[in-house]
């Protein structure tokens, strides 16, 4: 029981046992701290540090400002003017002005280290998602990230292991899981209307040409991912094309 989850998955897969061992929380090898069963206490006022306040980040901020029990405590972006503009908007809405962090692409580390935050939310270019998540977790903050949360297996494990080590939640913010259609099908499954589900797949078409070929916003960085990775990209990640 001293082996890590990663070692457990590797050993059972190598032995061909993955299909015969029930991989539920009750059967995972756990550390003495029981990381899979940690619980975070409720937070009456959630203090959020937000990293990346471009188009998508700005949309998230607008939504967060409509919620009770939420305080935008800090803003971080490589463009100082964006932080200044949002500080003014938040102040004009009668809320406490958030602290700004604009000293370059890694200033989120200073924010995580210095600010009293409950949650660090990021909507940055994809290569920054995991570094921001890990910094937040190491400093005792919960983390939420735009999609894709990670794009390598090693990074996925790094996030899982950090969340367990520091006992903080990490979630990928994918709105398409909670739209009316998805929740309707989920409810039908729970009611047994489809019988016993053995396998299911889902997907959707998402035309991103107007975004990828724009000279502003996500177009400044997103199309580079399509050019340097041999893959067919979706909003949430990528599907390998098989080319080398």
Image (cartoon, helix red, strand yellow):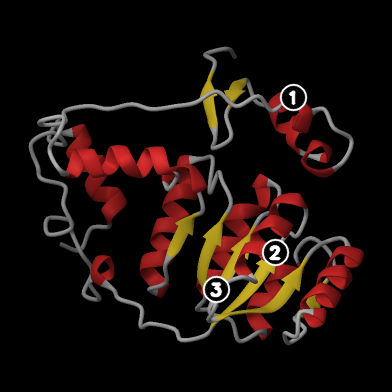
- Judging by the rendered image, the residue that carries numbered circle 2 is 51
Residue 122: horizontal and vertical position, in percent? Answer: 63, 60
First-in-chain label (2 vs 3): 2
- Element at label 2: strand
Residue 49: horizontal and vertical position, in percent? Answer: 65, 73
Q: Is residue 183 above or below residue 240?
A: below
Q: Nearer the viewer, mark 2 or mark 1?
A: 1
- The residue located at (66%, 84%) in the rendering is 115
Q: Quadrant of residue 206?
A: top right
Q: Are marks 3 and 1 in contact (CB under 8 Å)?
A: no
Tell me the distance, in whole angstroms, between the alpha carbons under discs 2 and 3.
Answer: 11 Å
- The residue located at (53%, 46%) in the rendering is 150
- Judging by the rendered image, the residue that carries numbered circle 1 is 209
Q: Is residue 61 above or below residue 15?
A: below
Residue 119's disc is 3
Q: Is residue 180 left or right of residue 199?
A: right
- Report the front residue among 70 and 153: 70
- The residue located at (52%, 21%) in the rendering is 240
Residue 47's disc is none
Crowding near pointer 3: few (<14 within 10 Å), some, many (20+)?
many
**Number of numbered markers:** 3
Q: Are marks 2 and 1 in contact (CB under 8 Å)?
A: no
First-in-chain label (3 vs 1): 3
Tell me the distance, in whole angstroms, between the alpha carbons under discs 2 and 1.
Answer: 25 Å
């Amino acid at each position: 029981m001293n082996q890590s989850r990663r070692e457990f998955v590797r050993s059972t897969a190598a032995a061909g046992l993955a299909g015969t061992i029930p991989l539920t929380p009750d059967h995972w090898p756990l550390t003495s701290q029981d990381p899979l069963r940690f619980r975070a206490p409720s937070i009456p006022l959630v203090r959020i540090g937000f990293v990346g306040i471009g188009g998508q980040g700005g949309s998230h901020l607008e939504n967060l400002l409509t919620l009770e029990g939420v305080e935008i405590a800090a803003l971080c972006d490589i463009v100082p003017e964006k932080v200044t503009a949002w500080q003014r908007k938040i102040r004009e809405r009668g809320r406490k002005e958030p602290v700004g962090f604009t000293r370059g692409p890694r200033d989120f580390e200073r924010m995580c280290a210095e600010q009293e935050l409950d949650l660090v939310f990021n909507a940055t270019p994809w290569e920054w998602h995991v570094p921001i998540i890990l910094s937040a977790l190491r400093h005792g903050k919960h983390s939420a990230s735009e999609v894709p949360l990670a794009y390598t297996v090693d990074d996925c494990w790094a996030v899982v292991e950090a969340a367990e080590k520091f006992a903080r939640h990490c979630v990928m913010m994918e709105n398409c899981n909670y739209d009316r259609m998805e929740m309707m099908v989920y409810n039908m499954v729970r009611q047994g209307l489809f019988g016993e589900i053995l396998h299911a797949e889902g997907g959707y078409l998402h035309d991103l040409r107007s975004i990828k070929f724009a000279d502003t916003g996500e177009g400044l960085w997103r199309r580079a991912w399509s050019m340097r990775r041999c893959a067919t990209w979706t909003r949430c990640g990528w599907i390998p094309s098989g080319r080398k």
